Amino acid sequence: MRSLTVLLPTALLAVGLTACSATPSPDPSATSAESVATACAAVEGAVQDAVADFQQIDPADPQAAAAALGALATDVGTAAADVANDEIAVILPRLQSGLEDAATLMREIADGDLGKVAELQGPAREVQDAFEEFATLCGDQPTD
């Protein structure tokens, strides 16, 4: 059980530390029906909420963590349905998938399969990459 209390917070922290909020900027070169800035604004609330909710996950309670990750995945999927920009639309399903995979693994861990803790690295990387790509496209620039 000690390994779970060490590895689980580490795996969750790997995802949580990469989560960042972003402020969209105008994208005059956008070729899709929706600008990057508009798409970022449309999902920014969901991403920020996901970050805030993620930071509240108690790694000592894998069942609650699984439920929270599943809810985050659902929220991201709902937000993704409102995005028409190709650049942003491609990121959100990867983020959702990573969160769903992490939720599944957390459920298995909660059921006693501690061997799954190491497998959290894959979904954590997927979530991290998606958050980083979102931040690159949406961050550090003024809104329109």
Image: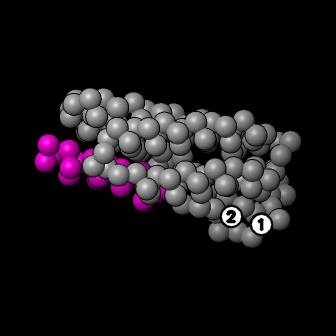
In the rendered structure, does residue 24 fall within the stretch colored magenta?
A: no
Residue at left offset 44%, top offset 38%: 67
- Picture coordinates of residue 139 (x, y %)? 64, 63
Labels 1 and 2 touching (C-beta < 8 A): yes
- CA gap, disc 1 to disc 2? 6 Å
Closest to the observer: 10 or 50? 50
Residue 23 circle label: 2
Given the image, on which type of amino acid does mark 1 rest? Thr
| 55 sits to left or right of 58 | right
113 in relation to 140, above or below: above
Type of secondary structure dominating the magenta stretch: helix
Are there few (<14), some (14-19), or many (20+) residues within 10 Å of tag 2? Answer: some
| 136 sits to left or right of 18 | right
Closest to the observer: 124 or 49? 49
Residue at left offset 35%, top offset 52%: 58
Considering only order in the chain, which callout, 2 or 1, is on the residue closer to the N terminus? 2
- Picture coordinates of residue 144 (x, y %)? 83, 65
Closest to the observer: 83 or 136? 83
**What span is colored magenta in the figure?**
1-19
- Picture coordinates of residue 59 (x, y %)? 31, 50
In the rendered structure, does residue 5 fall within the stretch colored magenta?
A: yes
What residue is pinned by disc 1?
Answer: 143
- Picture coordinates of residue 74 (x, y %)? 58, 36
Residue at left offset 75%, top offset 50%: 42
| 31 sits to left or right of 11 | right
Given the image, on which type of amino acid does mark 2 rest? Thr
127 in relation to 28, above or below: above
Question: What is the secondary structure assignment of the residue under circle 1?
Answer: loop
Q: Is residue 126 visible?
A: no
Residue at left offset 38%, top offset 42%: 64
Furthest toward the left, the residue is 2
Quadrant of the drawing holding the N terminus: top left
